[in-house]
Image (cartoon, rainbow, N blue to C red):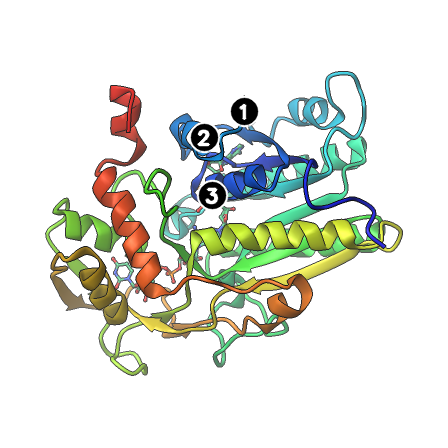
């Protein structure tokens, strides 16, 4: 039986909520009637995203600038100002560093931020008695999969320190659940999040040259970069380029709502540990995405096929059936929607949030 009315009015702490996926999820949470507190150190984001979330939702959230490695801060936040303990009904944990290449050159920064930060958060949650958690894992935990589509029971491996941090946190969460079945935990394995809110007001705002395909393509289309380098044209895929499962960030955000609802409905005595792929199940090649983006934007996206990028796999896409079964969730948006929304965001905010923050407007 449901312990809470999960439909509205719950208190949710969102770590990393000012970031790309976090901001879209905060909007979903507010629109569903929940009370949202964001804890973010803004190391890869700007407060402007949350101002826009509030204006889209027509409701405010609480923002606290802070680091998840600050145990005393987390403890104070989680027990609440009057020691009402627990002050939250769930935590959605996005905070972390995510650049694969950087993780190879700075592994300790990734272990400190992602691993130590998560240990700190889990200790504070334990102390406050907040035992409902949604964690951002990644399809990166599947390493180089033996076949596609990828189901949740496929073997896991890490090919870089970023991936290792996700793998270790997944294991930490399983150990925690085994030690205390009052925990209700969802480990969500995202495939390739892309796109932006349909309003064009919030979206992905990478600093420097983008590492990922969609923001790079967007910047080529708007004229910030001359051409796209397509990493590898000789993969064993239909057109020789890498195949991925791109998922619209708004679908991803609604997947978090579905996961929290499932956790709130789980028995609080026996708890639960859910591990779910969030993807579309559709494999899209680099050239498929380039063509779809050209159609959506009406702009050319010049490209050159170059050598493969180290560490890339040929094909990676989800078997999405478990999410449908366990969470009652499936994606609603297709590749054309992803490209149209990414383009709207890019063309209305050619320099991301920075320009708006400097001029005081969108
Ligand atoms: P993002 O960088 O936009 O958001 C992460 C947020 O966490 C940022 O606002 C950053 O300022 C904050 N943060 C980082 N370290 C912090 C710390 N120590 N204390 C407080 N705040 C901190 O990234 P995103 O794309 O929104 O990703 C969110 C989560 O999803 C990450 O954990 C990431 O690893 C995971 N993920 C992302 C992708 C992807 O392709 N974007 C794919 C799979 C998983
Ligand atoms: C997609 C495809 C590239 C850029 C990464 C992380 C993964 C997860 C999601 C966090 C590949 C090709 C790319 C370019 C290109 N993040 N490409 N030219 O590598 O699938 O996944 O983000 O958990 O852990 O590794 O995403 O967008 O970088 O690449 O040809 O300039 O586009 O080779 O085939 P990837 P991506």
Q: Residue 35, position in %: x, y?
A: 63, 32
Q: Mark 1 or mark 2: name the one nearer the start of the chain.
A: 2
Q: Which numbered dot is residue 63?
A: 1
Q: In this view, does 79 lie above or below 285?
A: above
Q: Which residue is drawn at 74% across and 58% down?
A: 273
Q: Residue 24, position in %: x, y?
A: 47, 43
- CA gap between label 3 and label 1 equals 15 Å
Q: Quadrant of the C terminus?
A: top left
The answer to which image quadrant residue 44 occupies is top left
Q: Residue 243, position in %: x, y?
A: 35, 72
For residue 95, say whether it is visible.
no
Mark 3, residue position: 24
Please tell me how crowded label 3 is: few (under 14), some (14-19), or many (20+) other residues with Cα within 10 Å: many
Asked if ligand 1 lies within 8 A of label 3, the reply is no
Q: In this view, does 128 lie above or below 151?
A: above
Q: Mark 3 or mark 2: name the one nearer the start of the chain.
A: 3
Contact check, label 1 and label 2, Cβ < 8 Å: yes
Contact check, label 3 and label 1, Cβ < 8 Å: no
Q: Nearer the viewer, residue 95 or 253?
A: 253
Please tell me how crowded label 1 is: few (under 14), some (14-19), or many (20+) other residues with Cα within 10 Å: some
Q: Which residue is drawn at 36% across and 51% down?
A: 101
Q: Which numbered dot is residue 215?
A: none
Mark 2, residue position: 50
Contact check, label 3 and label 2, Cβ < 8 Å: no
- CA gap between label 3 and label 2 equals 9 Å
């Amino acid at each position: 039986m449901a312990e809470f009315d999960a439909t509205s009015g719950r208190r949710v702490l969102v770590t990393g909520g000012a970031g790309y996926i976090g901001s879209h999820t905060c909007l979903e949470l507010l629109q569903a009637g929940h009370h949202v507190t964001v804890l973010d150190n803004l190391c890869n984001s700007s407060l402007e995203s949350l101002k826009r979330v509030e204006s889209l939702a027509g409701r405010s959230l609480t923002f606290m600038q802070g680091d998840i490695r600050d145990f005393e801060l987390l403890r104070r936040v989680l027990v609440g100002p009057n020691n009402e303990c627990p002050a939250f009904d769930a935590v959605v944990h996005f905070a972390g560093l995510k650049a694969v290449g950087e993780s190879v050159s700075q592994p300790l920064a990734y272990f400190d931020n992602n691993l130590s930060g998560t240990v700190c958060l889990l200790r504070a949650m334990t102390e406050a008695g907040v035992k409902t958690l949604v964690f951002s894992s990644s399809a990166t935990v599947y390493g180089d999969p033996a076949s596609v589509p990828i189901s949740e029971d496929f073997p896991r491996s890490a090919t870089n320190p970023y991936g290792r941090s996700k793998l270790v946190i997944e294991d930490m969460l399983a150990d925690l659940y085994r030690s205390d079945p009052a925990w209700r935990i969802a480990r969500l394995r995202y495939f390739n999040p892309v796109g932006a809110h349909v309003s064009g007001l919030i979206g992905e705002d990478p600093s420097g040259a983008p590492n990922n395909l969609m923001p790079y393509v967007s910047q080529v289309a708007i004229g910030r970069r001359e051409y796209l380098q397509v990493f590898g044209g000789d993969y064993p895929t239909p057109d020789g380029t890498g195949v991925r499962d791109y998922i619209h960030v708004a679908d991803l955000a609604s997947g978090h709502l579905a996961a929290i609802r499932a956790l709130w409905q789980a028995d609080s005595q026996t708890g639960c540990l859910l591990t779910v792929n969030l993807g579309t199940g559709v494999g899209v090649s680099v050239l498929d995405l380039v063509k779809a983006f050209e159609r959506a934007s009406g702009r050319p996206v010049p490209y050159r096929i170059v050598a493969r990028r180290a560490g890339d796999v040929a094909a990676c896409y989800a078997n999405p059936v478990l999410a449908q079964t366990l969470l009652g969730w499936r994606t609603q948006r297709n590749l054309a929607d992803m490209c149209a929304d990414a383009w709207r965001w890019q063309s209305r905010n050619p320099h991301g949030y920075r320009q708006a923050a400097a001029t005081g407007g969108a």
